[in-house]
Image (cartoon, rainbow, N blue to C red):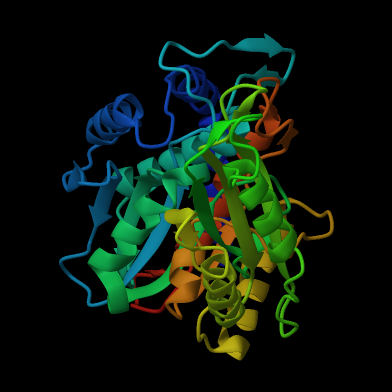
Amino acid sequence: MKKELSESIERYAEGSKEESVRLLESLGRIPAPSHHEEQRATFCRSWLISQGAEHVYIDGAKNVVCEIGCDKYEEVVVFMAHMDIVFPDMDSLPMRREGNRLCAPGIGDDTANLVNLLIAAKYLLKEDMHFGAGFVIVANSCEEGLGNLEGSKTICRKYGAKIRAFYSFDGYLPQCCSSAVGSYRFKVTARTKGGHSYLDFGRENAIRVLCSLTEALYEIEPPQEERTTYNVGYIQGGTTVNTIAQEAHMLYEFRSTSQECLKKIEQVFYETVDRFRNEKVQINVDILGIRPGNGQIHQEKLREFTKRSAEIVQRYYEKEMDFKAYSTDSNIPLSLGILANTIGTVTGGGAHTREEWVDLESLNTGVKIILDLMFQYTKDKDGEEND
């Protein structure tokens, strides 16, 4: 990176420390369960407008989308961090500060990463920048759980082949993910005539049907091309101890980084379920969520793209990188053949617990990382891309 740009990043990040903490304290109190991000979306849109954003809106998926220069370029680069958290609270979230630690549900996953993205976006809005592509800054919805990545899907549907590169900011330093763990999730419901445990003994029992089905599902040999797993994680049903269960249901999922493997095990899953259907047993399968795995993508280009991201992260954070596969917003572009990374920009711990915390000093590091990644797609006064 050119010296003047490096110095500019350092000055800006240093000068933004207090604002970053204030923004995190404000945003971190706002509830945002998946599908119910309205309050955070309104806050983020208003904040971006207050920083000078002219093209910012909330789309049908409740994403907050800020476009910079998109009307001038055929290609766009997406920079995204999700608003939703795993907790169902609809009242103000509890928060406490312990020295340099800020503790709150969802504060690291993904509120702190979102704050770093917003602070970096402010730089773009305030400075006279020369861009090499349109920038799409997104505070997105529905990354967690049964949000099923709807926010990311909506962005990829809108911009499609125009997306030159995609960055999701999520998780902790030094995560740099370029491989998507896909998952297919189902609710399987068995229904029978049921009856009295003594008088109607011998009739089909919905609980027994699901138990037998579970055993059969665990006999499936998963595809071997890529690591593929499955799990029955929840089962419920019946009425009382002396009732032959009329209805029971279970939650089942399978996972893989390979979209091809996911499709293979999906076919075997449906074939297995079909074997348990008959005139006395009704079985319904409801799809709860689909997160695609890796699609057809140019592997050498993806390796170089990820290597470049890691080099930028390690300019500011020297520990060994974490390149493991994860299930993140990048699943969608990776499934479509679009170069994508999910990068952590803060340090902390306790993700998905109410005791989650972030190190406030790491906000400064994260802003630098995001700005450095962004500067790859800007140009100097002579029209050459910064690098």
Please name whichever residue, 365 or 114, is drawn nearer the observer in this view of the structure: 114
Res. 312 visible in picture = no
Image position of 69 with respect to 40: above or below: below
x, y percentage for residue 130? Answer: 31, 65
**Left or right of residue 200, residue 119 in this image:** left
Image position of 233 with respect to 386: above or below: above
Q: Residue furthest front?
A: 199
Res. 301 visible in picture = yes
Image position of 183 with respect to 363: above or below: below
**Left or right of residue 332, residue 320 in this image:** right
Please name whichever residue, 386 or 262, is drawn nearer the observer in this view of the structure: 262
User: For residue 319, which quarter of the picture?
Assistant: bottom right
Tell me the residue at 71%/48% (across/down): 173
Tell me the residue at 44%/30% (across/down): 33
Q: Residue furthest right?
A: 320
Please name whichever residue, 2 or 72, is drawn nearer the observer in this view of the structure: 72
x, y percentage for residue 287? Answer: 43, 56
Image position of 176 with respect to 226: above or below: above
Please name whichever residue, 170 or 237, is drawn nearer the observer in this view of the structure: 237
**Left or right of residue 187, residue 107 in this image:** right
x, y percentage for residue 164? Answer: 38, 76
